Image: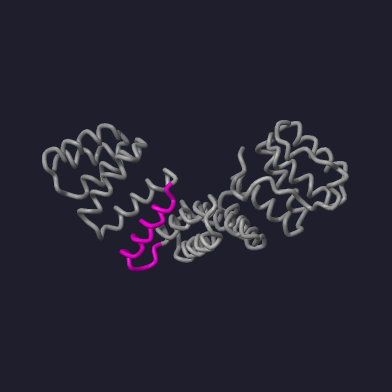
Amino acid sequence: DSYIYRGQSYLRLKQYEHAVEDLDMAVELGSTDAKTWNLRALAQRCLKNYPAAIADLTEAVSKEPNNVDFFFNRSQCYQETGEHELATADLHKALELRGEPDALLLYHRGLAQYAMSNSGADGSICDQALKDLEAAVQYTLGAAHLPDCHYHIGLACANRGRHEQAVIAFSEAIALQPDMTPYIHERAKSLQMIGRQQEAIVDFTRVLQIHPKSAHAYFRRAFAYKALGNFENSANDFETAKAISPENPLLVVNYLQLYQTPVIELCKAGQEIY
């Protein structure tokens, strides 16, 4: 047990390699306690040794198949390695074992399902993600995760074409973290999609104050100016976007053809790069 306790202490001190060494020794000396494998998995995860972490958590689950934490911890490894379907399955099981709504588990299952929908899964998966994320808010998700939860609600709504709802969710996120560029940028795009062009311009301008080389923000703001009849500012923004990213053919526009084009979407909500 002394190796387990010291390994746990090293884990808390973020000395992950020492933690693994002590927990290796505990296993070698015959520990049968499932928490030994769980603790070693946590250290391996921090070291980004995901196959080892997943193997340890699978062993922990086999020893204690009703332990919610073990399923949750393995789901995080799967999520971080892009195995979103496996993450979702583990979170389903964790919620089943919990036996009652759990805001943190719902939030993470929502994120996993959103990631699945964002990589080409059926649109109904996005709706399931939205349901989980909204439930996480309803069941009082902790402050550390709440802004991101509202943001992902907004992304799910925007990618399903529900821009009025998306604006509300992005605004909730911005109220909690006012200077997060992705929150502001995505709200600007949704405002634009529902015709609130002046508000969209304000948000796009805030984005550009933080990231003056965001070609996408200039490009989308150009359409907002065009919608308001401010063709000089619109043209300036189109040209600035093209100058920032001359290699991107999507930013090269034909002004005559743009007359009947309200907006060109360059990427899905949540895929902007800064």
What percent of the width, then of the height, locates residue 15? Answer: 30, 33
What is the magenta segment's predominant secondary structure? helix
> Can residue 147 be found in the magenta stretch?
no
Residue extending furthest left? 29
Q: Residue furthest bottom?
A: 100
- Residue 50 appears at what percent x and percent y? 35, 40
Q: Is residue 90 magenta?
A: yes
Residue 110 drawn above or below residue 53: below
Horizontal side of 147 relative to 240 (left or right) equals left
Q: Is residue 38 above or below residue 246?
A: below
Judge whether 210 appears above or below 117 on screen.
above
Q: Which residues are magenta?
A: 83-102
* Residue 66 falls left or right of residue 153: left
Quarter that holds the C terminus: top right
Name the side, left or right, on which 43 lies relative to 80: left
Q: Residue 193, how many percent across, how many down?
A: 72, 56
User: Residue at image x 39%, y 66%?
Assistant: 101
Residue drawn at x 43%, y 55% is 108
Q: Residue 210 location, x and y as percent?
A: 65, 38
> Within the image, what quadrant is residue 236 found in?
top right
